[in-house]
Image (tube, rainbow, N blue to C red):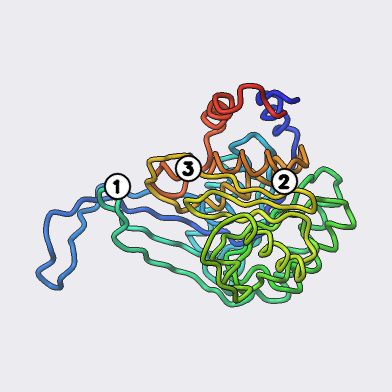
């Protein structure tokens, strides 16, 4: 049995590498009092502007929020958004030596216009074509250098289909992780969904699984989801499926065990970024315990907490610890 405080203390000894698409999340907060005379759209009077680190950078923020050392390997453009994003990561203690700047693409910047905690519009500035071979080799070099140190316990693939992760790069990185005996986890998207062969923990949401496999799932229960896991395993030969089920919780299965952990009742404000929290927390817990039940349970609680906040936010370690101690006062049995 391990006490919760001991587990959270152990997070600080864990070094994590996050590889994937970073982006800047820009928020314009305002209020609406009238409709525009120029078109039938609301006029938003902007009260404040805010920038946050999103995408794979938000995964790194969640890892860092739990106390672990985190290295970010990604690509940004030679632009103001790239500078702002890199600075945000550095301010939060994320190691950014693996960030490369590209002259051929823009930094992804998603601008959300929000009034009364409701999203009015989102504007995306981005390039989603595949990165070139030179940049791909630079990224691979950073990954090899970090893994060869022997300090990295887990590598997280965070795929947003923005062009960084190609099938070939994924294959090379997985080979390096096997060489250096580093655990691998992935939050996939459709383009490379079935490219992560041999990964340890595969964490899609149920809709992504249905789309990728071309299957219809009309009822969410254990028997059906176990069959979904088997279909995924035929393609990926992975160890663990961790499938998020929206308001129904999470499903988890390895070779021995399978279970659904239901969501707790929450005042949901915004689900954006919840998947980032799940993969970050799950990766840390699995790297330290290899226990899929606690991996899924802790990630499920963490995701519920961040959904109570508007916009992309990282998990609050103290709040997470408090809730886990209340839910399971005897610790990790």
Q: Is residue 233 left or right of residue 299?
A: right
- Give whichever of discs 2 and 1 has the lower sequence position: 2
Q: Identify residue for label 1.
A: 48
- Image marks 2 and 1: residues in contact by CB distance under 8 Å: no
Q: Please state, as top left, top right, bottom left or bottom right, where the N terminus lies in the image.
A: top right
- Examine the rendered structure and indicate whether residue 58 appears above or below residue 112: above
At a point 21% along the width and 57% down the height, the residue shown is 44
Residue furthest to the front: 223
* Residue 121, quarter of the rendered image: bottom left
Q: Identify residue for label 3.
A: 306
User: Where is residue 256 shown, x and y percent of the image?
Assistant: 79, 49
Q: Residues within 10 Å of mark 2 (few under 14, many from 20)?
A: many
At a point 30% along the width and 48% down the height, the residue shown is 117
Look at the image and tell me whether residue 170 can be seen: yes
Which of the pair 105/296 is nearer the observer?
A: 296
* Mark sitting on residue 59: none
Look at the image and tell me whether residue 158 can be seen: no
Q: Is residue 310 left or right of residue 66?
A: left
Question: Nearer the observer, disc 2 or disc 1?
Answer: 2
Question: Nearer the observer, disc 3 or disc 1?
Answer: 3
* Residue 94, quarter of the rendered image: top right
At a point 54% along the width and 65% down the height, the residue shown is 207
- Examine the rendered structure and indicate whether residue 310 appears above or below residue 177: above
Q: Residues within 10 Å of mark 1 (few under 14, many from 20)?
A: few
Distance in Å between CA atoms under marks 3 and 1? 22 Å
- Give whichever of discs 2 and 3 has the lower sequence position: 2
- Examine the rendered structure and indicate whether residue 158 appears above or below residue 316: below
Disc 1 element: strand
Q: Is residue 175 left or right of residue 122?
A: right
Q: Please state, as top left, top right, bottom left or bottom right, where the C terminus lies in the image.
A: top right
Q: Identify residue for label 2.
A: 16
């Amino acid at each position: 049995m391990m006490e919760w405080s001991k587990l959270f203390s152990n997070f600080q000894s864990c070094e994590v590498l996050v590889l994937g698409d970073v982006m800047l999340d820009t928020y314009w907060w305002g209020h609406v009092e009238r409709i525009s005379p120029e078109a039938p759209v609301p006029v938003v009077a902007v009260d404040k502007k805010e920038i946050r680190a999103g995408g794979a950078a938000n995964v790194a923020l969640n890892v860092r929020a739990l106390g672990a050392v985190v290295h970010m390997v990604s690509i940004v453009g030679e632009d103001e958004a790239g500078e702002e994003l890199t600075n945000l990561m550095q301010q939060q203690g994320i190691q950014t030596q693996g960030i490369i700047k590209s002259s051929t693409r823009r930094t992804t910047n998603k601008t959300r216009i929000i009034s009364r905690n409701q999203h009015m519009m989102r504007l995306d500035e981005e390039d989603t074509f595949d990165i070139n071979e030179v940049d791909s080799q630079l990224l691979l070099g950073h990954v090899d250098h970090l893994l060869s140190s022997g300090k990295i316990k887990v590598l997280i693939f965070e795929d947003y289909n923005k062009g960084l992760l190609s099938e070939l790069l994924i294959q090379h990185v997985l080979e390096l992780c096997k060489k250096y005996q580093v655990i691998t986890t992935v939050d996939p998207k459709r383009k490379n969904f079935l490219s992560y062969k041999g990964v340890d923990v595969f964490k899609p949401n149920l809709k992504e699984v249905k789309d990728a496999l071309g299957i219809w799932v009309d009822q969410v229960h254990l028997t059906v989801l176990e069959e979904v896991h088997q279909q995924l395993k035929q393609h990926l030969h992975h160890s663990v499926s961790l499938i998020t089920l929206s308001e129904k919780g999470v499903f988890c299965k390895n070779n021995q065990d399978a279970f659904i952990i239901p969501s707790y009742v929450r005042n949901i404000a915004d689900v954006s970024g919840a998947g980032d929290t799940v993969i970050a927390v799950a990766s840390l817990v699995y790297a330290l315990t290899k226990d899929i039940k606690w991996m899924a349970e802790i990630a499920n609680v963490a995701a519920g907490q961040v959904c109570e906040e508007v916009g992309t936010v990282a998990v609050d370690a103290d709040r997470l610890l408090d809730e886990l101690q209340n839910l399971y006062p005897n610790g990790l049995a």
